[in-house]
Image (cartoon, coloured by chain):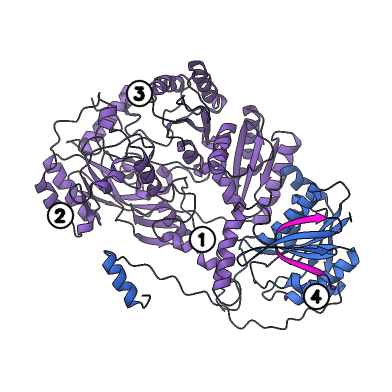
């Protein structure tokens, strides 16, 4: 009875504010929790994975060095080792002293840059540079290239494949100090901004101007838009707004030799030669550093509805999806699948009451966004009546207000954190044709049950909590997650290369949206053939002949 | 044990999670194209009424009537109340305009409804989050001559009395009163449920009676005129100090020490 509910918490804030601030009419309380304040780097909403929390974990349990964990990966002897003179040189070319984090100044501050969000990879970089402009990035890279110093570009460090942290002693180039919005055109909807702008800040800025960023993902409170472009992040609304390969109109990028590519196009159509920006989108920092982007942003929808369903089988989920595409058509903006176990883990780790009274093996969250509330509601109601009437969904709810909508989204967006609760997660982000979509989870579960490694949430002697799945059903993109108490070679042995072989047989992709990074470099051949890989290597050598950009990752170079 | 006929007034307000903006003329808050939903305190009233029904035997709660005085779209709010478990509703339709009815007029309308519907328990939100008046419940109790328990965090039905726990400064106060009674709800009373799909469907078939202000004796004439609405000054950004000494001298400079 005394527990603070969603409404309670918010309303407490508001009613206290209402008591203390004496202003006319209705404004004071709400303005105090203004959304505009999101423009400050840290977000008050709970939708973010903050790097801060990652660091808190780090204090409690050390992550092993990647170099120790993967002894088969050797430091490339062609790369020079960082010297005192190098650091002094960087100090001389950077405008501000705060742009340099050095092991001699503060070793603990380096930890956050060396350790990845999943807490699986930990590098040993002794230097972090935070340039404030493309020119500074250019000076840094030119020097590194001349000196054969390897670098790893880093955004919000929220990646899931170990792509944004050093493997050995690479210099971290963080884009966090480049965080200004450069321009926004309300007529065309084109936003031009620095690479280090936090996604949620960009989105809040656009929302105030009746637009939205065409990308949304769970890590929005920490991740950078430049990192999003560099990794070609997919996220929750790809179904509606398409991939960054379509929405990004131009990039400003620095090549390893210091060349600055000023290609911040703001045109939708421009058939004049090779589309160079596409090389950088999804290149994961291996060909250059993106320092600015221009992107086409859609109008914000006036009417957004969120519904959450319980379904009894995957067959029902497929039928609901077909129906949603047919009946909701152009207003459908998300169709997310979460299996029953994910919801149990979320319930267990957060203590939030389940949205539905009964438990179901499958849950689906759908969102519609449109320009006309009544029109959308009529469509949604017709859809709901049909899926209920035909017993496609067993139960469900529709958010009656924005707070409820946000709470329902937590049951999807909060899953990575819920899975990480016990220690760590083996994560696989794959594309699978819809017919076999959920079979991967079932097969994987069988494997782990047979091996006797699953202890559930109670049995502390076994490493595995369970095998769970969720994903962007609308994009055939599944997240297979194996939350564990500790990272265990036996668990890894059961998963790899089994998962990749399973995917290859069904002509899926071993990385739908998370990218390759360190985790999947050795497995890329399950999804791409040797010819394609060889052409990729040629591209890489053209841009980065010395191979200093984010080495040991992406694709095998030999 | 008496049977209860509960009246739950609900108000359609700008959604709690939306940041309101003042219009250019500084006469009111911009409402066009802004998401609206049920006043969160009223959600608590609806939930508590439904829980009273679920907690007691079949016939104890005879009727739960939701009522809203508002523009045409307030009907959506009533459908939500019915999807959460209210039996039927009355919509007193008033045109959408900047000036809202004042609490006294609302209380007078509610009084007429109470008398006509023979309600013996009215559960109201302790305030609405748009005008923050916090008066309607108390005024209604005065007009009806009923007992009132405001800011409830627990409501128990005992025979023909209600035992209500109130949160007051420095602790809780438990009061008991005979029905008929007025209760206003506070935040810790309960956690409102999600309306389930089957109940949302059923709510569409429940009775929603339309009425007009002319159907009541009260005259809709506001006694106060809003002269000006302004936003609070924007928050000043914080500053950094380098060490404890810096902090102390800064505090002294600001007169805090």
Question: Which colour is chain A painted?
Answer: purple
Q: Where does the image place residue A536, in percent across and percent down from the top left?
A: 29, 31
What mark, if any, has residue A91 been given in the picture? Answer: 2
Quick check: A34 above or below B249?
above
Dominant secondary structure (helix, strand or loop) of the stretch shown in magenta? strand
- Nearest the camera: A374 or A115? A115
What mark, if any, has residue A210 been given in the picture? Answer: 1
Q: Circle 3 is placed at which residue position?
A: A525
Crowd rating for badge 2 (residues with CA inside 10 Å; few <14, some 14–19, many 20+): some
Q: Nearer the viewer, mark 4 or mark 2?
A: 4
Q: Classify residue A315 as left or right of residue A555.
A: right
What mark, if any, has residue B142 been given in the picture? Answer: 4
Residue at 27% in and 68% down: B246
Q: Nearer the viewer, mark 3 or mark 4?
A: 4
Which circle's residue, 2 or 1, is located before the other in the chain? 2
Q: Secondary structure at mark 2?
A: helix
Q: Secondary structure at mark 4?
A: helix
Magenta residues span B145-160
Q: Where does the image place residue A111, in percent across and percent down from the top left?
A: 28, 44
Q: Which chain is blue?
A: B
Q: CA distance from mark 3 to mark 1?
A: 43 Å
The verdict on a common chain for dots 2 and 3 is yes
What mark, if any, has residue A499 been given in the picture? Answer: none
Q: CA distance from mark 4 to mark 2?
A: 74 Å
Residue at 42% in and 36% down: A513
Judging from the image, mark 4 belongs to the subunit labelled B
Q: Secondary structure at mark 3?
A: helix
């Amino acid at each position: 009875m005394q527990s603070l509910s969603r409404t309670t918490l918010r309303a407490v804030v508001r009613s206290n504010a209402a008591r203390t601030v004496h202003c006319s009419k209705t404004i004071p309380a709400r303005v105090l929790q203004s959304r505009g304040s999101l423009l400050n780097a840290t977000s008050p909403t709970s939708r973010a994975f903050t790097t801060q929390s990652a660091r808190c974990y780090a204090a409690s349990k050390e992550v092993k060095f990647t170099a120790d964990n993967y002894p088969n990966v050797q430091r490339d002897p062609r790369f020079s080792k960082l010297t005192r003179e190098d650091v002094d040189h960087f100090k001389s070319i950077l405008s501000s002293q705060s742009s340099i984090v050095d092991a001699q100044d503060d070793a603990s501050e380096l930890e956050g840059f060396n350790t990845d969000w999943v807490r699986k990879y930990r590098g040993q970089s002794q230097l972090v540079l935070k340039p404030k402009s493309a020119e500074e990035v250019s000076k840094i890279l030119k020097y590194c290239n001349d000196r054969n110093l390897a670098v790893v570009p880093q955004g919000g460090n929220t990646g899931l494949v170990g792509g944004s942290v050093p493997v050995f002693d690479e210099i971290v180039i963080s884009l966090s100090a480049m965080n200004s919005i450069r321009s926004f055109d309300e007529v065309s909807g084109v936003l031009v901004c620095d690479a280090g702008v936090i996604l949620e800040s960009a989105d809040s800025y656009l929302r105030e101007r009746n637009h939205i960023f065409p990308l949304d993902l769970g890590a929005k409170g920490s991740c950078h838009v430049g990192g999003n472009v560099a990794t070609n992040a997919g996220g929750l609304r790809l179904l509606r707004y398409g991939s960054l390969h379509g929405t990004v109109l131009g990039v400003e990028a620095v090549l390893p030799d210091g060349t600055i590519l000023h290609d911040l196009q703001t045109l939708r159509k421009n058939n004049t030669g090779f589309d160079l920006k596409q090389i950088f989108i999804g290149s994961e920092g291996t060909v250059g550093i993106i320092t600015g982007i221009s992107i086409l942003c859609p109008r914000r929808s006036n009417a957004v509805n969120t519904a959450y369903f319980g379904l009894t089988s995957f067959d029902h989920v497929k039928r609901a999806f077909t129906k949603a595409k047919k009946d909701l058509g152009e207003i459908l903006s998300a169709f997310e699948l979460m299996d029953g176990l994910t919801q149990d883990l979320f319930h267990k780790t957060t203590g939030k009451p389940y949205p539905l009274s009964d438990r179901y093996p499958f849950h689906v969250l759908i969102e519609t966004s449109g320009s006309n509330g009544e029109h959308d509601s009529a469509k949604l109601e017709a859809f709901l009546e049909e899926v209920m009437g035909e017993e496609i969904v067993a139960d469900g709810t529709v958010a009656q207000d924005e707070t409820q909508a946000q709470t329902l989204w937590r049951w999807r967006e909060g899953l990575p954190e819920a899975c990480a609760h016990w220690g760590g997660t083996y994560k696989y982000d794959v594309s699978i044709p819809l017919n076999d979509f959920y079979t991967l989870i079932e097969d994987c579960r069988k494997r782990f049950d047979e091996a006797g490694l699953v202890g559930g949430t109670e049995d502390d002697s076994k490493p595995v909590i369970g095998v769970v799945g969720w994903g962007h059903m609308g994009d055939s993109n599944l997240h297979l997650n194996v939350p564990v108490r500790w990272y265990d070679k036996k668990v890894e042995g059961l998963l790899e290369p089994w998962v990749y072989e399973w995917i290859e047989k069904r002509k899926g992709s071993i990385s739908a949206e998370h990218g390759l990074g360190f985790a999947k470099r050795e497995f890329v051949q399950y999804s791409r053939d040797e010819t394609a890989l060889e052409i990729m290597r040629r591209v890489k050598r053209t841009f980065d002949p010395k191979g200093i950009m984010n080495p040991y990752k992406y694709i095998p170079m030999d | 044990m008496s049977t209860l006929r509960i009246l739950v007034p609900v108000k359609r307000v700008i959604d709690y999670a939306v940041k309101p903006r003042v219009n250019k003329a500084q006469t009111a808050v911009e409402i066009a194209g802004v998401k609206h939903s049920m006043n969160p305190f009223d959600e608590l009233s609806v939930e508590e009424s439904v829980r009273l029904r679920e907690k007691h035997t079949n016939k104890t709660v005879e009727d739960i009537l939701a009522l809203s005085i508002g523009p045409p779209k307030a009907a959506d709010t009533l459908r939500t109340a019915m999807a959460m478990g209210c039996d039927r509703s009355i919509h007193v339709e008033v045109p959408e305009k900047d000036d809202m009815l004042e609490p006294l007029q609302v209380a007078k309308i509610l009084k007429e409804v109470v008398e006509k519907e023979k309600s013996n328990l009215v559960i109201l939100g302790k305030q609405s989050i748009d005008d923050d008046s916090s008066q309607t419940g108390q005024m209604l109790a005065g007009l009806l001559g009923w007992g009132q328990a405001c800011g409830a965090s627990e409501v128990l039905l005992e025979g023909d009395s209600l035992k209500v726990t109130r949160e007051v400064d420095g602790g809780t106060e438990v009061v008991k009163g005979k029905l008929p009674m007025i209760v206003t709800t506070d935040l810790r009373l309960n956690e409102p449920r999600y309306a389930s799909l089957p109940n949302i469907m059923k709510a569409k078939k429940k009775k929603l009676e339309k009425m007009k202000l002319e159907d009541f004796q009260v005259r809709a004439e506001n006694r106060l005129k809003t002269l000006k609405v302004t936003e609070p000054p924007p928050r000043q950004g914080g500053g950094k100090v380098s060490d404890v000494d810096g902090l102390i001298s800064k505090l002294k400079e600001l007169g805090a020490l």
